[in-house]
Amino acid sequence: MTQFTEAVYTNGVLKPSEGLVLREAQRVRLIVEALDDDDRPERPAALRRFMAGIEGMSFFSREPLPSRDELHDRP
């Protein structure tokens, strides 16, 4: 049986946010994915570079846009 929940890591122990359907001392397999990595020092700088890149992009066509019939394959 597969169950999905979030947990908080405190003092070396993972504490699930919801009850799990497990028998006492049952072995399980964990895949841990951090949900709040915003405290990493490189993240704000990476976000600024990303936003600057978006601002420098041009999303305008210099040519006429295709018609609906040109966009769709019609027999």
Image (cartoon, helix red, strand yellow):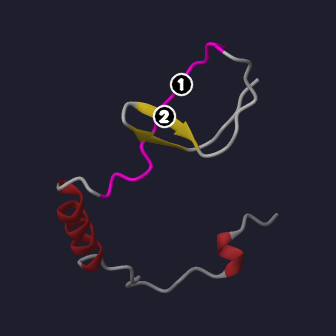
Q: Residue at x 53, y 25 (%)?
A: 30
- Which is nearer the eye, 21 or 3? 21
Q: Which residues are magenta?
A: 25-38
Q: Residue 63, relative to residue 70: is it above or below?
A: below
Q: Going by the image, does 15 lie left or right of 68?
A: left
Residue 65 is left or right of residue 55, and the answer is right
From the top left corner, tell me how far across and down residue 37 is, in percent.
34, 52
Q: Is residue 61 above or below residue 33?
A: below
Q: Which residue is mark 2?
A: 14
Kind of residue indicated by mark 2: Leu
SS type, badge 1: loop
Query: Residue placed at 64% from the left, 82% from the top?
Result: 67
Which numbered dot is residue 30? 1
Q: As rendered, which of 1 and 60 lies closer to the eye?
A: 1
Q: Is 3 left or right of 27, judged from the image as shown?
A: right
Q: Do the CB atoms of the residues marked 2 and 1 lie less than 8 Å apart?
A: yes
Callout 1 crowding tier (Cα within 10 Å): few <14, some 14–19, many ≥20: few
